[in-house]
Image (cartoon, grey):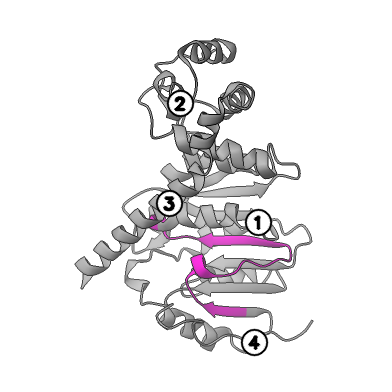
């Protein structure tokens, strides 16, 4: 196996920032071993770790994978990791924000304790970019994990879009006592496994995501939202065919029902409605990115 070198600096000025004061490090050895026991490489040689921190999880991943890419946004922590693992050719430490990190084309598995306040951004990146991702084992806020796994009764918009390509399930809770500092919310370990055959793919998947992204802000009830893209008569037909109540919130609509609504839209929508919906997913993502950037800027300014 060729020797891998560690990158000792960010690829762009200001790419890394001191973040360690805002991180919750997973430090309990017994919990770490239990979590890593769930990870099944299945012949895949590369693991990507997001935010390795001080390297507690990294050490265990090196026992499972011949190649570990450790992407750390905190420059001080990244340099410490390079100092610690620099002589090991199996690991590459990348000082960079994971959201700007180009995902590998070769098959890989993600194993990470991700920042709870950046969960949606990280999951969107993993699900949205074309790469060799096979599975992601993620430690995240329990509430988010339940929504992604559709175990909370009200899965998020992102969870529905994610379900087209990934089977998501909970692997178990992670106690607050396993972290330093102790977080103020419960955590869980979740598995995002790439489907061999997606529920929808290509242009069809893009149209489904556009429809959901357009409808989700237009409630409060399902019937009211559907009237933005269907006639009143069509809304009643769609609701009756799917066995749905027009007063139920959009967050309570299950994936199979959204798929039925999507099929009805493809069959009955007017050209004007199609034009209105087209590109809604990209517009919503851009809006969320602006809001998240504004929030991070606000938090950063408050800490100064």
Q: Any mark on residue 175, and which?
A: 3
| Magenta-colored stretch includes residue 104 | yes
Instruction: Determine whether 65 is above or below 282 in the image.
Output: below
Check disc 4 and report its element: helix, strand or loop. Answer: loop
Q: How packed is label 1: few (under 14 Cα within 10 Å), some, or many (20 or more)?
A: some
First in sequence: mark 1 vs mark 4: 4
Q: State the separation of the CA atoms marked 1 and 4.
A: 26 Å
Q: Nearer the viewer, mark 1 or mark 2?
A: 2
Tell me, yes or no, whether the two marked residues, 3 and 1, touch with CB atoms within 8 Å.
Answer: no
Q: State the separation of the CA atoms marked 1 and 2.
A: 31 Å
Question: Which residues are the magenta region?
Answer: 92-117
Image quadrant where one finds the N terminus: bottom right
Q: Any mark on residue 5, and which?
A: 4
Report which residue position mark 1 lands on: 39
Q: Is residue 207 left or right of residue 105?
A: left
Report which residue position mark 2 lands on: 252
């Amino acid at each position: 196996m060729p020797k891998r070198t560690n990158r000792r600096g960010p690829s762009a000025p200001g790419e890394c920032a001191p973040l360690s004061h805002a991180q919750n490090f997973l430090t309990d050895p017994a919990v770490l071993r239990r979590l890593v026991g769930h990870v099944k490489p299945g012949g895949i040689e590369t693991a990507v770790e997001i935010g390795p921190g001080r390297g507690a999880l990294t050490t265990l991943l090196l026992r499972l994978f011949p190649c570990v890419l450790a992407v750390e946004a905190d420059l001080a922590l990244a340099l410490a990791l390079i100092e610690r693992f620099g002589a090991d050719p199996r690991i590459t430490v990348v000082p960079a924000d994971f959201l700007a990190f180009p995902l590998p084309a070769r098959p890989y598995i993600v194993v990470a304790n991700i920042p709870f306040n950046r969960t949606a951004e990280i999951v969107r990146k993993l699900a949205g970019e074309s790469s060799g991702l096979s599975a992601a084992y993620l430690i995240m806020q329990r509430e988010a994990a339940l929504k992604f796994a559709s175990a909370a009764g009200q899965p998020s918009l992102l969870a529905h879009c994610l379900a087209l390509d990934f089977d998501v399930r909970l692997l178990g809770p992670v106690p607050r006592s396993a972290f330093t500092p102790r977080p103020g919310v419960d955590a869980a370990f979740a598995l995002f496994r790439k489907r061999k055959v997606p529920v929808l793919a290509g242009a069809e998947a893009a149209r489904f995501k556009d429809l959901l992204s357009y409808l989700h802000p237009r409630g409060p009830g399902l019937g009211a939202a559907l009237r933005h893209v269907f006639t009143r008569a069509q809304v009643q037909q769609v609701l009756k065919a799917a066995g749905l109540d027009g007063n139920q919130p959009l967050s309570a609509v299950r994936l199979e029902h959204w798929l039925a609504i999507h099929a009805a839209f493809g069959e009955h929508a007017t050209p004007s409605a199609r034009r209105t919906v087209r590109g809604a997913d990209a517009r919503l993502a851009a809006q969320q990115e602006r809001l998240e950037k504004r929030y991070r800027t606000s938090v950063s300014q408050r800490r100064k």
